[in-house]
Amino acid sequence: MTEQVTAPAPVLVRAASAETVRDGAASLITLFADSAQTKGALTANRATLRRGSPGAPAHFHTRATELFFVLGGKLRVLLGESVVTLGAGDLVTVPPRLPHAFAPAPGTEADVLVAFTPGMDRFDYYRLLERVYQGRAGVEEIRASSERYDNHYHESPVWQAELARA
């Protein structure tokens, strides 16, 4: 007797029904599929970074590779000790433990598809960022959640110099 393997169900998210959170005055995050929905395969969201958005500070993840695919605009990304600028159609993957950060290139906007694989529950982290932005939670809650959301902040003189240059 052969064992029957059940394939995971497809995940379909319509743009009109996707939840969007605001984690800053110039930044929106559209939540597409979290780890629970994809049975751990991936987590996906869209980052819309308007001109002047600070993006994400230097950080790293220990359990997942993060992928950035630029849909439009220009995105600058810290990759360890170097900074690259990505344009529409460019893709970069960031392996676990590599410090990285991202923001729109100076004077531009960036529209980016972001995915983590394997998936990790991130949507509550993005909701926490929104609560902090709205003043309904404190930055200490972000610090306290670093293990839960596998988001570890990192001091980067290279990124600080890049931001100062812009």
Image (spheres, rainbow, N blue to C red):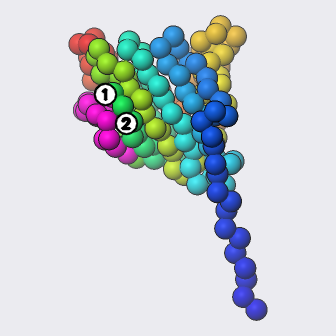
Residue on which the image places disc 2:
70
Disc 1 secondary structure class: strand
The crowding category of the residue bearing disc 2, from other C-alpha atoms within 10 Å (few below 14, some 14 to 19, many at least 20), is many
Marks 2 and 1: CB-CB under 8 Å? yes
In the image, 113 versus 137, the foreground residue is 113
Q: Does 39 lie within the magenta span?
A: no
Three-letter code for the amino acid on which mark 1 is drawn: Lys
Residue 146 seen in the current view? no
Secondary element under disc 2, as helix, strand or loop, is strand
Q: Residues within 10 Å of mark 1 (few under 14, many from 20)?
A: many
87 in magenta: yes
Q: Quadrant of the N terminus?
A: bottom right
Looking at the image, which residue is at 70% across and 75% down? 5
For residue 130, which quarter of the picture? top right
Q: Which residues are magenta?
A: 75-93
- Image mark for residue 74: 1
Query: What's the mark number on residue 136?
Result: none
| 3D distance between C-alphas at marks 2 and 1 | 7 Å
Would residue 86 be found to the left or right of residue 64 on screen?
left
Q: Left of 125 or right of it: where is 100?
A: left
Closest to the observer, 151 or 3: 3
